[in-house]
Amino acid sequence: MNKYLTIFLLLSFSVSAEVVTTIGEYSYGGELSRNDGCALAKEKAKLKALEKVLGQKISSEEIESCSEVDGKTDCERNQWFLSSFNGEIIDPVWTIPDVTSQKLNNGEDYYTCEIKLKANVKQTAQLLDPSFDFNVKLNERNFREGEELKIDIELNEPIFLTIFQILPYEKKDYKVQKLFPNPLLKNNFIDKSNISLPPKGVTWKTEFPKNVKKDRVEEYLLFIGSSKKIKWLNKYAEFEDIKKAYTNQKLVNYLYKTYTIIN
């Protein structure tokens, strides 16, 4: 009998959709177009709807840190994706965007797009028993080009662990790429209460993207734990692709970590 055999209890509850109404507002100027400004207002409305039903909340510190690196626009898009993992917005009904403008002291035009959303929101992923949990700590929050990335993981039950890198700035290649397991580290069954990755003899070094004309970029690590081995793809083109793959699975849990690379 396998000494690591563990029985997971799937919480039995019916996931029903809840109708919510929210208002998204986004202020913009400069090179950002009306369409882009209103698209971000929509994402803020959807984020508020998820928060109402799922109780998820993004801290102001996360937003400020992300904005300093990727800029406000990209930051809002990244945070929307990360917060939408456990929720789904169904049959959204939008009002016509209301755009107002004002003059700044320097004479430039400044716009605000406001839009109202009414939609059903439901939890998309079945959750594990609360005893199934894991914690992750990175050796640094900010890395210089070429510095080593190390990860410490604590868990209270054996799991199959998969780690994806999320590259929001990537435009021509895949935005989601599997970091672990890989051809060198094939076994992703973790049966210890503490583990460090990569193991001795292997190094993971940060690399500043060649297609980005900035001094700093923000990347994400997505950690997915499961009770059974799942054959994930090595790459996913878009954020939504990995979300769909995740929500189609049972007995899974996830968390993400953010880090910055400085050129």
Image (tube, rainbow, N blue to C red):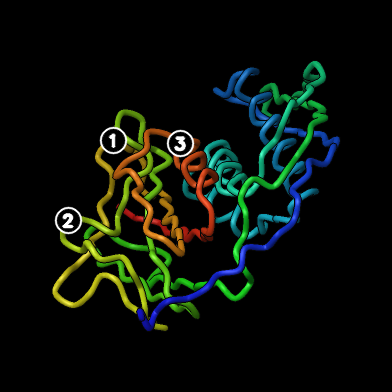
Secondary structure under badge 3? helix
For the residues carrying marks 3 and 1, which lies nearer the camera in this image? Answer: 3
Residue 68 at x, y percent in the picture:
52, 50
Q: Which residue is mark 2?
A: 183
Q: Residues within 10 Å of mark 2 (few under 14, many from 20)?
A: few
Q: Earlier in the sequence, mark 3 or mark 1?
A: 1
Secondary structure under badge 1? loop
Given the image, on which type of amino acid does mark 1 rest? Answer: Asn
Rendered view: 187 above or below 6: above
Q: Which residue is mark 1?
A: 211
Given the image, on which type of amino acid does mark 2 rest? Answer: Pro
Q: Examine the image and state in which quarter residue 132 appears.
A: bottom right
Given the image, on which type of amino acid does mark 3 rest? Answer: Asp
Mark 3–mark 2 distance (CA, rounded to whole Å): 22 Å
The residue positioned 48% from the left and 76% from the top of the image is 6
Mark 3–mark 1 distance (CA, rounded to whole Å): 23 Å
Where, quadrant-wise, is the N terminus in this rendering? bottom left
The label number, if any, that marks residue 241 in the structure image: 3
Residue 120 at x, y percent in the picture:
78, 35
Residue 188 visible in the displayed image: yes
Determine whether label 3 and label 2 are within 8 Å by CB: no
Determine whether, in the image, residue 63 is placed left or right of residue 190.
Answer: right
The residue positioned 17% from the left and 56% from the top of the image is 183
Q: Earlier in the sequence, mark 3 or mark 2?
A: 2
Determine whether label 3 and label 1 are within 8 Å by CB: no
Q: Residues within 10 Å of mark 3 (few under 14, many from 20)?
A: few
Determine whether, in the image, residue 47 is placed left or right of residue 125.
Answer: right
Determine whether label 2 and label 1 are within 8 Å by CB: no
Residue 109 at x, y percent in the picture:
69, 21
